[in-house]
């Protein structure tokens, strides 16, 4: 946005004046781009990114150094060529990945839209849509830009939209256009509109809008009710006309989606440090050699043999050049191929993840998608999971599962043998409805279901007997659909009545009043005049509020119903109690006056209405209760249990209400009845920051009393000590000392809790709890909670969600996982990984994550080791060549070490290695801990591997030096030369590092074997060929004649056998001893896997779990979730003006 | 999507994609480690002993004659050497060494010279030659700059250029060992042990160098612009006045030069000078004449000659044998220790009791991945 626009308070959009609009919004287009590069910017951005990596800068520097004459001890192109190779491989990968982004962008940009131009409709693509265009959107189409609704096919300029892409809610929302524009029903009329819209400047506030439309010099205010946002979808409305006010990247949706941040993994961070560390080693080595070089200048060999003619030949310039020579000599201590190998391997792993059959969801025909391959190893280190609820844990499908009517339990039988036998099926209920002695109660019950609600019926166009129900709350929809099961078909809604078809007979219930639902009332009632003239109140609501309002006498079903309610609640079902009462006309008469008066008050209307409702909602007769299942996705409890066993902390962040959230927490076994819940109660806290602060303090001090002193007094958040980086983190075991506790907080309280003065305290409290549930949180708060953990605790966070409202947290977390939900791919698109079901997270983390982490750490450590081993032999050699920087190996042999002979072992390590197979990783989730505690990749391991490399290189050099025996190595009396020595040593080094690779790998399949044995064989075969060809093409004249000598000399073969054996001996013995005498869990389980040993102890956990479940069911719960997720300032008003019988306005 | 029924995203069920490749899990258990250790022990020790014996069987006589020029003109015993005497003829710069061969040196017998602290592997040294010049001659202006500082002098090119050629070892050993018949120092017999200076370089070496004619053809008659390296002018009497058509080096047939040019990898090295593949060297006292021209004192090195037979691994080098024996023994020791421990207190493989969460007593988990080191 330019400055001038910023200063302008509002945008003026002219209706039907494209020239004026074009002048003003020339630069704004509806084209969106999520790609990283364009054809022109590729080289620039790519190089900038590549050379932000230390390693690449260093290699570029080396390559340049080599161009200085007389500096390089090796051929001058030996760094430049591999570097170019490595960069081009990365470039190809980048181009490939960006191409995919371009493709999806193009797909979006080329969607079709109808634009009104000069009285007619033109089909255009989305990217051609401009500010000020009037567009026509058809049913089930997405809005191409932010629009102001002008008119629609529905009565009263209403239209329904679905905003799952924006806020994750799949229920429909109602928008209503201004009356003044409602007559614009044809393209002609639209084209004739004159006037302008003053609109706010583009911003990211999804729920706010301010604007004014000026028609015929009269201005009418615009608010969010008229605003249709890009990303939303038109539903159940044939068409609408709308004016485009903002386009492309200015739309609220895109303003909300931050540019996907480039995420770096902690392993990458540490690798970067290690590269710097290696660079330090390199400097030390170079400096040592330079000092040696400097000191030797007085030695007479240099003076007499090398510089006999020159006087004072030695200068500062020589020292500097000498130093540079050593830098070039040792530059490959930093493995040039490491970064590209890592990226390649990560890419391969991501393909393997995409191809996992266990994460294939056949219902939707989707596989897992790994969108950011660079994060794969982070999957093995996740310590905190932040999960959305709706659509992530639940299917977002409500099902009328059970009901208790007149003390009888009825259940919807889906399968035979499903559910306890003592429950009666719905089919039998239908029979009871006719002939049971309490059939009137059943009748009332079902009537209530089909009458007392705010659902809008819609006749299916194809099959008039089928009705679709538009409910703003999925629970209500489920209840009305539930009534269908008993042949009570709700067919028509009029402003003052509803028609229900009972057994083929239309019954019209006159709706006299509706007492709306809100969170304090926790109930809704409808006062209806039945077809037989009786006036009745039908009331449904949470059990506690209903029970308070029951008649003292005559409620014969109460005890039974309470019993059933408890049963339902323990199963995690959402319950509602239904009650009714017949009202005498006189009573109604007096009451309705009070109610009417209340509904016309201007001040505190809601309160007045509540008071009025209170008067009529009394002496109710309890009919029974309903139980709705907020259907969990498959395998949720198991997945959550397993993940918690793995030591992962799971927090639920949901936009839902507290009761619903707790309910889901229960049913997915995140919390259980034994848990103590810390609920941030609005009443206690009184909604101030001070209150929240005091509340946290008091809770913290109670909990801390139970902690051992060491932990209670520990600083929080724990400092990232050197120890953490050295041998990995210490496990947070504080939770073990305190009884299981859960924390529940809602968005309002969270706002205070997240303030600077409270947030650390809050975090400490939250980390002490086994379960954390945040309800009614906004997308922004979700992201803030994730950031709170991410920024203050040294832990990897993962956020998982399905809706656009989760995008914030998905991007904020280290790893973002999107659910390929039923609707909307917004989250999946912003995420690093996309899966179709929450349960796939288990395999993604426990198996793929653990593998990736273990593979990559091996790959990295091994790469460092192998380079240290080879290049340090050069360092030891310096002591024997007068610190001249001479290489012991021929230049291209040296270069090929990194790009040919030792490139495959790390790759197969990264691709195939499995320290345990998938079954065992699944069976023993506790092994996952190693990941987030950083046990497999830390500085101590790095140092250990580096020391090993130093040890091996020293051993290698000393052995070959002694074996070489002053060059007299041939039975024919011939002498060996420098290059023969080098090639022999090279063969030994290669043998050693390949043996080490074999020892490091936990699994040998044909490819790994091929890579290890093949690399060695490749060298053995290529060496004589190279010795022959190299000198011929003048690549390596020094090797001339060696092909005939080297393999015929027995000392070569004897060295090649003994030296690697000596080197690897320690590693072999050590590895054996650590398994035998310092046995770890991993060792034991590996043995179980190899020798197929059963572990009965693992099965016990299932037994314990079963016991837990029985306990759970037996346990009584005080508060139950109840089924009402309707919005508080609900659309009841709008719904009541709805008339499905009214003719829709004509127009097209 | 209409075509979802036909086109399925279902991943292919093959071993690679599902990561179920048949694989061997290399687990180091006593069952496989103990046999391996014993196998290494049992197989390496005999090999080591064999190599050790082979090395010990090599007969070798080494004598350092660095200080020969400081000795008297008559035979005097050499300190630190048994039965070795030497004398020095200052005018002719001839060092004569008298030594005793105690056992028969079975043929073939090789004669090496040995230099120490000579950095033939120095970076500025290794590259200081011009292969094309050595093969067929080269124009001065095209000469490799690596030859500096012995590339050009006063517009004349050095032939051969570079440090390696200039520093060539120029002592001359007599091509025979002369047997001394009796204890009398001055009495020499006609019995000699001949040494040939042919076939001492690698067979392939000859291909890298040109013949005298090749060079004469290239440089024509204008040999005044081609001069011998400075050291050569001093050490080789024939080059004192530069080159002419008859004394121009015939590199292809000059094997000492080729041997020198094949640079050694370590600062102490031997180079083959001559050999006798025909006859054994009988015990006795022998004299050898050395024309002493090469100065090693200037850089603090030493020079020696070595008369030796060879073994399968070259010279009298017991190291390799010892290394094999050592590895074998260490391997056996570890094998025995592990075996005893295994018999005394075996560990049940894959026993779930060892799992940290089944160990009731220990609270801390020990799940380090340290064995990857």
Image (cartoon, rainbow, N blue to C red):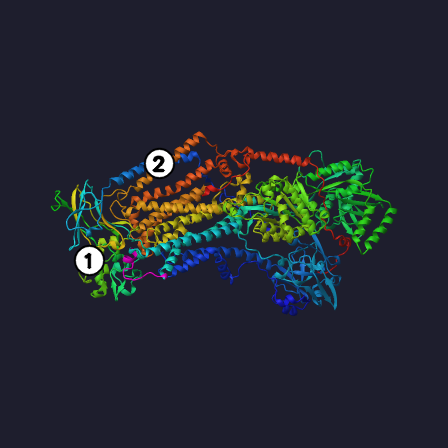
Q: Is residue A1024 magenta?
A: no
Question: Is A668 on the left or on the right of B187, as rendered?
Answer: right
Q: CA distance from mark 1 to mark 2?
A: 54 Å
Q: Chain of mark 1?
A: B
Question: Is B191 on the left or on the right of A888, as rendered?
Answer: left
Q: Which residue is mark 2?
A: B329
Between A299 and A52, the residue placed more toward the observer is A299
Q: Residue furthest top?
A: B344
Q: Which mark is residue B106?
A: none
Q: Chain of mark 2?
A: B
Between A718 and B240, the residue placed more toward the observer is A718
Which residues lie in the magenta part?
Answer: A301-316
Locate residue A142: give its quadrant: bottom right
Q: Is residue A302 magenta?
A: yes
| Helix, strand or loop status at disc 2 | helix
On the image, the x and y values in percent for residue A938 come to: 49, 47
Tell me the quadrant of the picture where the C terminus of chain A can be found. bottom right
Between B38 and B89, the residue placed more toward the observer is B89
Locate residue A418: give its quadrant: top right
Q: Which residue is mark 1?
A: B236
Between A389 and A1075, the residue placed more toward the observer is A1075
| Helix, strand or loop status at disc 1 | loop
Badge 2 density bin: few <14, some 14–19, many ≥20, Cα 10 Å: some
Q: Earlier in the sequence, mark 1 or mark 2?
A: 1
| A10 is higher (above) or lower (below) than A857 | below
């Amino acid at each position: 946005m330019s400055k001038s626009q910023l200063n302008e308070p509002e945008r003026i959009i002219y209706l039907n004046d494209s020239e004026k609009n074009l002048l003003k919004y020339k630069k704004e287009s509806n084209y969106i781009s999520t790609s990283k590069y364009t054809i022109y910017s590729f080289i620039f951005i790519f190089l900038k990114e590549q050379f932000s990596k230390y390693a690449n800068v260093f290699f570029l520097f080396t390559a340049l150094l080599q161009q200085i004459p007389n500096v390089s001890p090796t051929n001058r192109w030996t760094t430049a060529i591999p570097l170019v190779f490595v960069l081009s491989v990365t470039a190809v990968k980048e181009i490939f990945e960006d191409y995919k982004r371009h493709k999806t962008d193009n797909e979006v940009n080329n969607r079709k839209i109808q634009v009104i131009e000069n009285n007619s409709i033109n089909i255009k693509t989305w990217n051609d849509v401009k500010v000020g265009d009037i567009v026509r959107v058809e049913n089930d189409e997405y809005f191409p830009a932010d629009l102001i609704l002008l008119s629609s096919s529905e009565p009263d300029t209403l239209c329904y939209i679905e905003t799952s892409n924006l806020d994750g809610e799949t229920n429909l929302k109602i928008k209503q256009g201004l009356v003044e524009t409602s007559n614009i029903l044809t393209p002609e009329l639209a084209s004739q509109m004159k006037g302008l819209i003053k609109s706010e400047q583009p911003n990211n506030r999804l729920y706010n809008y301010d604007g004014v439309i000026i028609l015929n010099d009269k201005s009418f205010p615009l608010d969010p009710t008229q605003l249709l946002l890009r990303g939303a979808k038109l539903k159940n409305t044939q068409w609408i006309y709308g004016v485009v006010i903002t386009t492309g990247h200015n739309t609220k949706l895109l303003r909300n989606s931050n540019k996907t941040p480039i995420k770096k993994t902690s392993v990458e961070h540490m690798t970067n440090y290690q590269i710097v560390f290696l660079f330090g080693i390199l400097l030390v080595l170079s400096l040592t050699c330079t000092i040696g070089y400097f000191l030797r200048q007085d030695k007479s060999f240099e003076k007499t043999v090398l510089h006999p003619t020159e006087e004072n030949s030695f200068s500062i310039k020589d020292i500097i050049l000498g130093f540079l020579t050593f830098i070039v000599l040792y530059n490959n201590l930093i493995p040039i191929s490491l970064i590209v190998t890592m990226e390649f391997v990560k890419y391969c792993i991501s393909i393997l993840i995409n191809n996992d059959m266990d994460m294939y969801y056949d219902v939707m025909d989707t596989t897992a998608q790994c969108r950011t391959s660079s994060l794969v190893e982070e999957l093995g280190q996740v310590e905190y999971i932040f999960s959305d609820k709706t659509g992530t844990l639940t299917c977002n499908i409500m099902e009328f599962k059970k009901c208790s009517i007149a003390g009888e339990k009825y259940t919807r039988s889906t399968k035979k043998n499903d559910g306890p036998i003592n429950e009666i099926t719905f089919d039998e209920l239908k029979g009871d409805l006719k002939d049971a002695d309490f059939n009137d109660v059943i009748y009332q019950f079902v009537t209530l279901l089909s009458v007392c609600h705010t659902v809008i019926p819609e006749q299916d166009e194809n099959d008039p007997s089928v009705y679709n129900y538009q409910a703003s709350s999925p629970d209500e929809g489920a209840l009305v659909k539930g009534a269908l099961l008993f042949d009570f078909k709700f067919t028509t809604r009029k402003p003052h009545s509803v028609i229900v078809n009972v057994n083929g007979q239309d019954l019209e219930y006159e709706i006299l009043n509706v007492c709306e639902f809100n969170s304090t009332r926790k109930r809704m009632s409808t006062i209806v005049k039945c077809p037989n003239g009786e006036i009745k109140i039908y009331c449904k609501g949470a059990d506690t509020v209903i029970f308070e309002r029951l008649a003292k006498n005559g409620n014969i079903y109460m005890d039974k119903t309470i019993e059933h309610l408890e049963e339902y609640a323990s199963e995690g079902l959402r319950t509602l109690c239904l009650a009714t009462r017949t009202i005498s006309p006189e009573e109604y008469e007096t009451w309705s006056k009070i109610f009417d008066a209340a509904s016309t008050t201007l001040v505190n209307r809601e309160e007045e209405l509540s008071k009025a409702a209170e008067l009529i909602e009394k002496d109710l007769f309890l009919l029974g209760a309903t139980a709705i299942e907020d259907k969990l996705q498959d395998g949720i409890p198991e997945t959550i249990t397993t993940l918690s066993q793995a030591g992962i902390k799971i927090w639920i962040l949901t936009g839902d209400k507290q009761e619903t959230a707790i309910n889901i927490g229960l049913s997915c076994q995140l919390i259980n009845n034994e848990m103590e819940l810390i609920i941030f109660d609005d009443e206690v806290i009184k909604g101030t920051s001070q209150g929240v602060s005091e509340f946290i303090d008091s809770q913290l001090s109670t909990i801390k009393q139970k902690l051992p002193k060491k932990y209670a007094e520990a600083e929080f958040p724990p400092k990232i000590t050197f120890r953490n980086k050295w041998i990995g983190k210490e496990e947070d075991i504080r939770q073990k000392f305190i009884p299981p506790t859960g924390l529940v907080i809602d968005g309002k309280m969270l706002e205070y809790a997240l303030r600077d003065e409270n947030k650390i305290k809050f975090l400490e409290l939250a980390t002490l709890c086994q379960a954390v549930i945040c309800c009614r949180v906004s997308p922004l708060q979700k992201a803030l909670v994730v950031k709170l953990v991410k920024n203050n605790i040294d832990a990897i966070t993962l956020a998982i969600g399905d809706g656009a409202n989760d995008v914030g947290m998905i991007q904020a977390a280290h790893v973002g996982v999107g659910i390929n939900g039923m609707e909307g791919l917004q989250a999946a698109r912003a995420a690093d990984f996309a899966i179709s079901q929450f349960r796939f997270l288990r395999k993604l983390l426990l198996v793929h994550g653990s593998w990736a982490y273990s593979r990559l750490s091996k790959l990295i450590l091994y790469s460092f080791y192998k380079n240290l081993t080879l290049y340090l032999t050069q360092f030891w050699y310096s002591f024997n060549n007068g610190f001249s920087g001479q290489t012991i190996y021929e230049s291209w042999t040296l270069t090929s070490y990194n790009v040919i002979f030792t490139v495959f072992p790390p790759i197969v390590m990264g691709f195939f290695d499995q320290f345990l197979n998938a079954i065992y990783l699944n069976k023993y989730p506790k092994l996952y801990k190693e990941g987030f505690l950083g046990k497999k990749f830390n500085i101590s391991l790095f140092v250990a591997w580096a020391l090993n490399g130093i040890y091996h290189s020293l051993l290698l050099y000393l052995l070959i030096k002694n074996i070489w025996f002053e060059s007299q190595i041939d039975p024919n009396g011939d002498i060996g030369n420098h290059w023969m020595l080098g090639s022999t040593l090279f063969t030994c080094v290669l043998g050693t590092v390949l043996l080490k690779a074999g020892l490091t790998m936990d699994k040998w399949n044909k490819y790994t074997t091929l890579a290890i044995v093949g690399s060695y064989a490749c060298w053995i075969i290529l060496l004589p060929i190279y010795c022959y060809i190299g000198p011929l093409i003048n690549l390596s004249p020094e090797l001339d004649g060696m092909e005939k000598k080297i393999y015929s000399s027995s000392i070569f073969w004897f060295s090649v056998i003994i030296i690697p054996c000596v080197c690897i001996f320690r590693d072999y013995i050590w590895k054996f001893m650590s398994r035998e005498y310092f046995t770890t869990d991993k060792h034991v389980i590996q043995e179980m896997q190899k020798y197929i040993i059963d572990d009965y102890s693992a099965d016990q956990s299932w037994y314990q779990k079963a016991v837990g479940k029985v306990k759970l069911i037996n346990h009584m719960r005080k508060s139950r979730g109840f089924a009402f997720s309707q919005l508080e300032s609900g659309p009841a008003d709008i719904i009541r003006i709805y008339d499905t019988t009214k003719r829709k306005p004509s127009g097209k | 999507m209409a075509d979802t029924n036909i086109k399925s995203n279902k991943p292919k069920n093959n071993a690679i994609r599902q990561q179920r490749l048949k694989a061997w899990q290399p687990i180091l258990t006593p069952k496989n480690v103990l046999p391996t250790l014993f196998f290494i022990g049992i197989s390496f020790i005999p090999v080591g002993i064999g190599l050790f014996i082979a090395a010990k069987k090599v007969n070798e006589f080494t004598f350092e004659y660095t200080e020969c020029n400081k000795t008297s003109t008559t035979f005097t015993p050499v300190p630190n050497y048994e039965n070795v005497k030497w004398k020095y003829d200052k005018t002719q710069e001839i060092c004569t060494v008298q030594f005793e061969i105690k056992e028969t040196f079975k043929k073939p017998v090789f004669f090496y010279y040995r230099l120490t602290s000579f950095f033939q592997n120095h970076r500025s040294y290794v590259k200081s030659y011009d292969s094309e010049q050595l093969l067929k001659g080269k124009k001065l202006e095209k000469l490799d700059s690596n030859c500096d500082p012995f590339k050009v002098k006063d517009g004349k090119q050095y032939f051969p250029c570079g440090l390696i050629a200039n520093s060539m070892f120029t002592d001359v050993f007599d091509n025979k060992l002369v047997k001394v018949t009796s204890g009398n120092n001055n009495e020499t017999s006609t019995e000699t042990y001949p040494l040939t200076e042919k076939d001492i370089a690698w067979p392939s070496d000859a291909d890298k160098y040109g013949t005298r004619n090749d060079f004469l053809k290239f440089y024509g008659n204008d040999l005044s612009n081609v001069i011998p390296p400075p050291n050569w002018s001093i050490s080789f009497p024939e080059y004192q006045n530069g080159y002419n058509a008859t004394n121009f080096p015939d590199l292809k047939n000059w094997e000492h030069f080729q041997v020198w040019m094949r640079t050694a990898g370590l600062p102490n090295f031997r180079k083959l000078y001559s050999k006798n593949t025909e006859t054994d060297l009988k015990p006795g006292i022998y004299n050898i004449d050395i024309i002493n021209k090469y100065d090693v004192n200037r850089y603090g090195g030493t020079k020696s000659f070595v008369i030796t037979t060879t073994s399968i691994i070259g010279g009298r080098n017991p190291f390799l044998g010892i290394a094999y024996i050592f590895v074998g023994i260490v391997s056996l020791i570890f094998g025995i220790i592990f075996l005893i421990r295994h018999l005394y207190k075996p560990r049940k493989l894959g026993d779930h009791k060892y799992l940290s969460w089944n160990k009731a007593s220990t609270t801390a988990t020990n799940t380090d991945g340290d064995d990857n080191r």
